[in-house]
Image: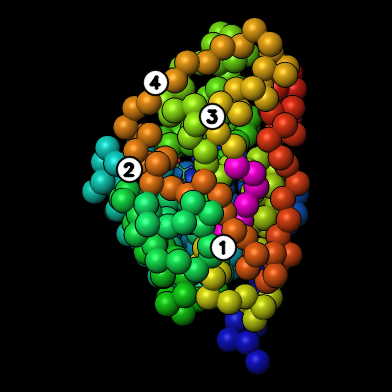
Amino acid sequence: MSMFMDLPTGRVLVTGALGQIGTELVEALRQKHGHEAVIATDIREAEGCQILNVMDKKGIKKLMFEEQITEVYHLAALLSATGEKNPKLCWDINVTGLENVIAAAKENNARVFSPSSIAVFGPDCPKNAPQITPLNPTTVYGKTKVVGEELAVTSGIDMRGIRYPGLISYKAPAGGGTTDYAVEIFHSALEDGHYECFVREDTKLPMMYMDDAIRATIELMNIPFEDLSDSRGGYNISGCSFTAGELVRSIQRHLPEFTCTFKPDIRQKYADSWPEEIVDVVAKEEWGWKPRFNLDKIVDEMISNLKK
Ligand code: SER
């Protein structure tokens, strides 16, 4: 018999609900469970969203108890570029914040989804990253995600995560990540006809359209705990991989006049330390992961939605 028999009967809590992932995940969860069942929280104020700081251990416990939370999507975090500028804050939010959520989840017998990232890999990882490989990231952000994956399997609760690739979406801005160029480029292409990209033209990284990422998250949380291995701390899932140059050329199918120049900054270093591709056979086998969006399809969707 499973030690986690009680599947969510209570409500769902989302932290970092106003971020790039949260904006769309809250929408999807409210469709699935009903509006009232999903408590969206963030440190910023917005309609339909409560204030919650993940550093407020007592506050999280209180909210989870009062709202009878049985499932948490813990999205509050600092990304790689912001994290390197402020490593202490990155550690506090990404690790201590997560520990606070885990402690509250334990008390409330709740399950937790905690995102991991392709940033867990370091320069010693093969360019086509396997699920199981030594994790030696160079960024603080990557290190905090490795700790998160470890906590998923050692904390004694039902906790799962996905190593998200760079996420591309049009509903909310990406904020403070290395892969942000793959979002910014669309806005600049449509508004200015030009983009100055902060990584080299030949920089190739794993990317994914947000629809795929949201579907992956919900699919993973639907799987019985027993069916998942210790890879549940952070599953490799692949969407598609492309270079910045290939992205430009795909956008030019819609906007032939669009130009892009390349002026690498410090974020090039982080990008160079990450793999180019992701091997996702474990996610495919354990919970049936399958992406739907390739590069051209992502570009078609982004351009048509941003034009509206
Ligand atoms: N997209 C994130 C970043 O660039 C990686 O998880 O920081």
Q: Secondary structure at mark 4?
A: loop
Amino acid on which the number 1 mark rests in the picture: Tyr
Task: Kindly indicate whether the residue at mark 2 contacts the one at mark 3 (C-beta within 8 angstroms).
Answer: no
Rendered image: mark on residue 83: 2
What's the distance in space between the residues labelled 2 and 1, CA to CA?
A: 22 Å
Determine which residue is flagged by label 4. Answer: 263
What's the distance in space between the residues labelled 4 and 1, CA to CA?
A: 32 Å
Residue 206 versus residue 129 in the image, above or below: above
Question: In the image, 37: left or right of 267?
Answer: right
What's the distance in space between the residues labelled 3 and 4, CA to CA?
A: 12 Å
Amino acid on which the number 2 mark rests in the picture: Gly
Residue 8 versus residue 32 in the image, above or below: below
Determine which residue is flagged by label 3. Answer: 244
10 Å neighbourhood of mark 3: few (<14), some, or many (≥20)?
Answer: many
Q: Quadrant of the C terminus?
A: top right
Q: Residue at x 68, y 71 (%)?
A: 286
Amino acid on which the number 4 mark rests in the picture: Lys
Q: Secondary structure at mark 2?
A: helix
Q: Secondary structure at mark 1?
A: strand
Residue 298 versus residue 38: which sits nearer the camera?
298
